[in-house]
Image: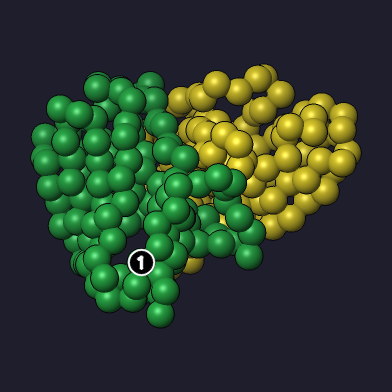
Chain colours: A yellow, B green
Amino acid sequence: KAGVTQTPRYLIKTRGQQVTLSCSPISGHRSVSWYQQTPGQGLQFLFEYFSETQRNKGNFPGRFSGRQFSNSRSEMNVSTLELGDSALYLCASSAGQGAGQPQHFGDGTRLSIL
Amino acid sequence: GESVGLHLPTLSVQEGDNSIINCAYSNSASDYFIWYKQESGKGPQFIIDIRSNMDKRQGQRVTVLLNKTVKHLSLQIAATQPGDSAVYFCAEISGGSNYKLTFGKGTLLTVNP
């Protein structure tokens, strides 16, 4: 069974631009969650999508948004990029909604803002 | 590889020794806990989980202990191997559908051959 796939692996953008990251969950998994990982803040929860609806949200500004498609694939968008948005963005999938079960992570997209 | 964190607590052990990685969690209402392993350049990998109605759970070469009185979680790795070298995170989860998930900062485990 293929794992969680994130594309692209690396991305370089400049301040003010926007970016879209993609995540394909494990086949059969309907929940997709997004996380930001930085050296200073560690791993922080962004949001979770289940059945094309955002079910839970962390403490990030509205510049961070996402969506999920009918095939459970998910995209995350960050608008008006800031230097502080440089991070590893991780996607995780699980069979059901909520954090009460193990999540399987992809290897992330490394986003660098110049 | 790339570092996933700076100024992480570190633990250095000899191959074959047992390792104990500790985690203090913050929310007494947390009812589910997970340990993850993250190797350089990769995403976190699920190791073992435990719910708050248990105080111990064992997997293959790993044991998680939960002490709710002092809000402490530990991960024990038996017969540590070089392949166990990684950053280990604990995660605590509280709430139902609007759950709150918080990760610890991580511990860097280095296994010396």
**Residue A84 found in image quarter:** top right
* Relative horizontal placement of residue B41, taking residue B110 as reference (left or right): right
**Residue at position x 51%, y 24% from top?**
A58
Please name the residue that numbered disc 1 is placed on: B13
Spot occupied by residue A66 in the image (x, y as percentages of width and height): 62, 32
Kind of element beneath mark 1: strand
Under mark 1, the amino acid is Val
Can residue A51 be seen here? no
How many neighbours does mark 1 have within 10 angstroms: few (below 14), some (14-19), or many (20 or more)? some
**Residue at position x 74%, y 55% from top?**
A10
* Relative horizontal placement of residue A16, taking residue B7 as reference (left or right): right
Q: Is residue A113 above or below residue B10?
A: above
The image quadrant where one finds the C terminus of chain B is bottom left
Count of residue discs: 1
**Residue B90 found in image quarter:** top left
* Camera-side residue of B89 and B10: B10
**Residue at position x 42%, y 38% from top?**
B104
The image quadrant where one finds the N terminus of chain B is bottom right
Spot occupied by residue A85 in the image (x, y as percentages of width and height): 72, 34
**Residue at position x 62%, y 41% from top?**
A38
Say which chain tag 1 marks.
B
**Residue A76 found in image quarter:** top right
Q: Is residue A33 above or below residue B5?
A: above
